[in-house]
């Protein structure tokens, strides 16, 4: 409160650049509330800051993104209308979105084969089930008409039986549906995970190509050693100010209490950006802001080090430059 | 009956592409799906490009882009027409959302494996422009305006706006006092604004 106007104005610039932590951001917002003059000043700064967005290298989003956005819009809108709530609920679960997509035939192309198979299996079981019930109804009808009983009684019984069968069928159909739904759900989820991982791989590949296609780009391929023989990695950097990237694939989890550490050799010196781990599928995509001197390292390697990292390599090599 | 349907269709057809941003927003305020789609067509690429530049990861950039456009719809009532340009508002939402994602990710990685961020050093030299930016006239103008700033002011802008670092983190990494970083930010934005205004006036006059 008692802080000087100048210090506060300095924070307005940081606010516009997004450089305040959450707590300070809220403080600034509270103070702006009752001060139109400060707000006008902030708006000027925000305008300048927003122009920086135009400096981002143009990048084409996938074409499916618009459809996915509108799908989320539709779901929130529907939820708003049914609940009559003024605010939309949180984003729908992945499962809900996925299910909608899988059930809609015109979007079938977007669904992986395993998902299609799972849905088809559920549909096929329903057909078989309906056929069995239908046959049973036919049998009872035949039985009733062939027996020598009075006409009215037969008609009434038939009607009653049909009603009962209908009721039972409905219950059973629901049960079977629920069971199949559960099975389908897990299959769909697995398939979606696979699809996501593939999609990520493709986007990383694209990103990597963009990075190394620019002038002044440098990259090093690394290959696995010993137990990590299957592992591969690429370290790529260019001089456009974009962060360098270390992309690792097929590396097992580090041993208990250990981490992987990246080492870069340049001009007779060694430097490490730090340690990392890999995801359960053995991959890692790590962005690094390298000091300019290191942006084209002579040599790179990855070793196993204790949590917290070492100041020089001590553990065994897991990735070294490909020969 | 058929001719009636045709007539309605013709009367109600709106060419969303030709509407102004403000008109689209007015329609989005009443949950017009096509208006949101048209706004996405107009700005989706830029929002995505900004997120991709900051996050370096197309996957999360897609999530962020979706969130930004849904936020526009949810928060459209808080947009005051005539007070600042729409794109300023949109890019602020996009920038804040991306920064949140960036910081969330850093916190997570920090828990996972602390030293990575700690060792990061600062590129003090401002980065030269990527080719495709220069090709776009608006981007070129901003690039030019940014070029009039001293290197240390460009550096704080790069680290905060694109790197998502807070002023305290920048002070930490560049070894400059916090007060200096704050002042640089203010001077940098002031100068950038001035240089942009000059260029806009030059162009229109």
Image (cartoon, rainbow, N blue to C red):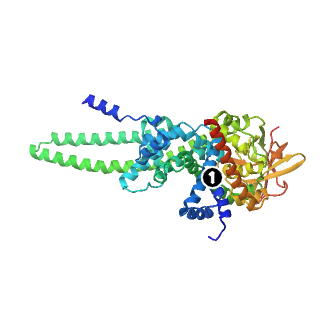
Q: At which x and y percent is residue B51?
A: 61, 46
**Left or right relative to A310: residue B87:** left
Q: At which x and y percent is residue B165?
A: 69, 55
Q: Please tell me whether mark 1 sits on a helix, a strand or a loop.
A: helix
Name of the residue lying farthest toward the top:
B3
- Look at the picture and state if A213 lies above or below A276: above
**Left or right relative to B182: residue B9:** left
Identify the residue under disc 1. Answer: A45
Residue at image location 62% in from the left, 63% down from the top: A24
Residue A150, image quadrant: top left
Name of the residue lying farthest toward the front:
B205
- The residue carrying pointer 1 sits among few (fewer than 14), some (14 to 19) or many (20 or more) residues within 10 Å by Cα, namely many
Q: Who is closer to the viewer here, A218 or A229?
A: A218
- Look at the picture and state if A227 lies above or below B129: below
Q: Which corner quadrant holds the N terminus of chain A?
A: bottom right
Q: At which x and y percent is residue A177?
A: 38, 48
Q: Who is closer to the viewer here, B54 or B198?
A: B198
Q: At which x and y percent is residue A209?
A: 69, 36
Residue B129, image quadrant: top right
Q: Which chain carries label 1?
A: A
Residue at image location 69% in from the left, 55% down from the top: B186
Can residue A94 be spotted in the picture? no
């Amino acid at each position: 409160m008692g802080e000087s106007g100048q210090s506060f104005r300095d924070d307005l610039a940081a606010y516009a650049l997004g450089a305040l932590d959450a707590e300070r951001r809220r403080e600034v917002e509270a103070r702006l509330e009752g001060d139109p003059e400060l707000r006008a000043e902030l708006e000027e700064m925000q305008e300048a800051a927003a122009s920086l967005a135009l400096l981002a290298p143009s990048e084409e989003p996938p074409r499916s993104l618009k459809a996915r956005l509108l799908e989320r819009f539709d779901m929130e809108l529907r939820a708003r209308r049914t609940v009559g709530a003024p605010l939309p609920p949180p984003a729908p679960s992945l499962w809900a979105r996925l299910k909608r997509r899988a059930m809609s035939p015109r979007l079938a192309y977007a669904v992986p084969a395993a998902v299609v198979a799972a849905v088809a299996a559920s549909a096929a079981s329903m057909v078989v089930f309906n056929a069995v019930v239908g046959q049973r109804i036919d049998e009872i009808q035949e039985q009733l008409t062939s027996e020598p009983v009075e006409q009215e009684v037969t008609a009434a019984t038939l009607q009653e039986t049909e009603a009962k069968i209908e009721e039972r069928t409905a219950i059973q159909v629901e049960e079977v549906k629920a069971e199949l739904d559960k099975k389908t759900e897990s299959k769909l989820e697995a398939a979606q995970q696979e699809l996501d991982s593939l999609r990520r791989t493709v986007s990383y590949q694209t990103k990597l190509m963009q990075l190394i296609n620019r002038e002044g780009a440098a990259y090093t391929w690394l290959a696995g050693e010993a137990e990590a023989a299957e592992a591969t990695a690429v370290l790529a950097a260019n001089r456009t100010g974009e962060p360098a990237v270390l992309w690792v694939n097929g590396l097992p989890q580090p041993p208990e209490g250990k981490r992987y550490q990246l080492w870069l050799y340049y001009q007779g010196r060694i430097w490490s950006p730090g340690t990392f781990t890999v995801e359960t599928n053995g991959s890692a995509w790590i962005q690094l802001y390298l000091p300019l001197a290191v942006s084209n390292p002579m040599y790179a390697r990855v070793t196993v080090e204790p949590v917290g990292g070492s100041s020089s390599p001590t553990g065994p090599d897991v990735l070294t430059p490909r020969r | 009956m058929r001719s009636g349907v045709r007539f309605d269709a013709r009367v109600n057809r709106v060419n969303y592409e030709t509407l102004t941003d403000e008109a689209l927003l007015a329609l989005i305020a009443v949950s017009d799906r096509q208006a949101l789609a048209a706004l996405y067509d107009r700005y989706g690429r830029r929002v995505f490009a900004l997120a991709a530049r900051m996050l370096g990861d197309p996957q999360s950039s897609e999530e962020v882009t979706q969130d930004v456009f849904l936020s526009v719809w949810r928060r459209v009532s808080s947009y005051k027409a005539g007070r600042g340009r729409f794109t300023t508002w949109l890019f602020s939402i996009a920038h804040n959302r991306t920064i949140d994602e960036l910081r969330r990710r850093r916190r997570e990685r920090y828990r996972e494996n602390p030293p990575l961020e700690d060792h990061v050093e600062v590129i003090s030299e401002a980065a030269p422009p990527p080719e495709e930016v220069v090709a776009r006239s608006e981007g070129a103008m901003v690039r030019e305006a940014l070029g009039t700033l001293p290197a240390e002011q460009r550096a704080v802008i790069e680290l905060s706006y694109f790197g998502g670092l807070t002023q305290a983190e920048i002070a930490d990494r560049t070894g400059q006092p916090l007060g200096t970083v704050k002042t640089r930010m203010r001077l940098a934005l002031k100068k950038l604004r001035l240089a942009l205004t000059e260029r806009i006036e030059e162009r229109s006059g």
